[in-house]
Image (cartoon, grey):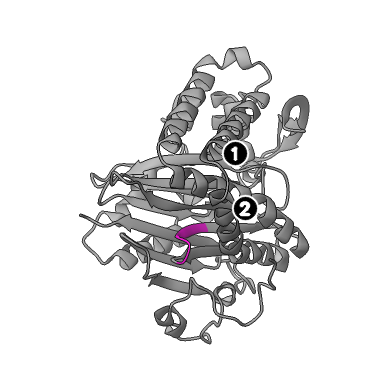
Amino acid sequence: MIRNPFEKQPHPSISSERQKEKTPSSPSPETPHDEQSLDVVPAKNVPGFTGLEVAYTLEKKHVQGKPRPSHNEDSALADPATGLMGVFDGLGGGPGGAKASAMASHVLPDFFLEERTRQALRAPEEVRGDLRAYLQKQTNEYIKLRPDPSAFPQEISALNADRQRMLAVLEQDTELSEKTLALLSTFKEMGLSVEITGGQTTACTGFVHQSADGTHYAVIANVGDSAALVLDSDGRIEQITHDDSLLNGLLESRGLSPEKLLEMKRDPAKQHNLPTFRDGILRMKLSPISYYQLSVTTMRTVGGEGHPSLTIRELSPGDTLIFCTDGVIDKYETMPTDQTTADDAISKMTDLDELASTFRSDAPFKSRVNELRLEASFRQSYKLTDDIAIVAARLKEE
């Protein structure tokens, strides 16, 4: 089922409260995609999520001395009918990126429901077998990016251990297995729909599942350089999704050394010769690129190349799951000082603790989401300006 993403129709993720809200200078949007034309969508609560407090916000990028673009290329999804949440970041500039992200966020819930029905009709062992095969493929693709896999024993061992951990969780819960495979399967259909727009988009999306024993799991499928983070009830934060940016790919494959990284960050406009990826394999053919260019390039997209990576993370009451596009996460990238070492350039690349500071307050939840958007929109880092989309979900205290 493919719908026109811009037709004037209600959507399950739009509550009556949300439809009535508007910014003072703009008309009230009739669909979630109309919100992409607004300069700012102040944080809004989305009711209907079982056991969760959910809010989202959007903001167009600031262009110094120029009016803001006509559309935000980022889109947000918070759909209580399916439990799906996530963010999408369109690529390509102009209206193409906005259309691509809007299409992806619009069709995903319908495709997910169709896939949920299909997976529920299959034998549980078939579903688990497909998940085992998918996770093995994910491991194989990770290894493929390494020119000499034998040089990465610790990384590959950790990846295999994480794969086994996720399989153990999935094999204990048939419903969770069906929902997880349904989410992964929707990316192919979503990609075909996005291709119609002529654009591409990232997608970081998932759901929170409660197992029969009361344990909650965040299940995230990610393509591109948007991110999902977990802030636990003790105030500790970590990024739980894999970053498909070219920068991260070069760092993981050791095509970019810590010393070279620090040199590039000290002079981000200067062109440097770096290895390139072709057909997913690191090639030693050198291509000139600046750090500014490197920091905005992603290796995988919906509507382009790439299958989603899967993350499953247990949540405790009071934990907050945060989806954000790179317009947020990149604003917290640290810039080197005279004391910064090559090791620091990697180990202290992103100040996630500073990002989390906006949530360490007693303010209403949507106010904390608003504060993160406001701070990210005005922070100075290598990505001088970008669109913003944030969806946050807090697991309520029992």
Measure how far apart labels 2 and 1 are at the Cα level.
41 Å
Q: Earlier in the sequence, mark 2 or mark 1?
A: 2
Q: Which amino acid, mark 1?
A: Asp
Residue at 53% over, 50% down: 120
Q: Is residue 269 left or right of residue 350?
A: right
Pointer 2 local density, CA inside 10 Å: few below 14, some 14–19, many at least 20: many
Q: Does 141 appear above or below 82? A: above
Q: How many numbered badges does the structure rendering display?
A: 2
Residue 123 at x, y percent in the picture: 55, 41
Residue at 73% over, 56% down: 192
Q: Which residue is mark 2?
A: 186
Residue 351 at x, y percent in the picture: 40, 43
Magenta highlight range: 81-86
In what element is the residue under mark 2?
helix
Residue at 23% over, 44% down: 234
Do we see residue 340 in this rendering?
Answer: no
Question: Which is nearer the eye, 175 or 234?
Answer: 175
Q: Quadrant of the C terminus?
A: bottom left
Q: Does 192 appear above or below 171? A: below
Residue 235 at x, y percent in the picture: 26, 46
Q: Is residue 309 left or right of residue 22?
A: right
Mark number for residue 77? none
Question: Which is nearer the eye, 107 or 75?
Answer: 107
Pointer 1 local density, CA inside 10 Å: few below 14, some 14–19, many at least 20: few
Q: Does 235 appear above or below 371? A: above
Quarter of the image where one finds residue 108: bottom right
Mark number for residue 267? 1
Which of pointers 2 and 1 indicates the residue nearer the eye? 2
Do we see residue 170 in this rendering?
Answer: yes
Q: Is residue 271 left or right of residue 65?
A: right
Q: Which amino acid, mark 2?
A: Thr
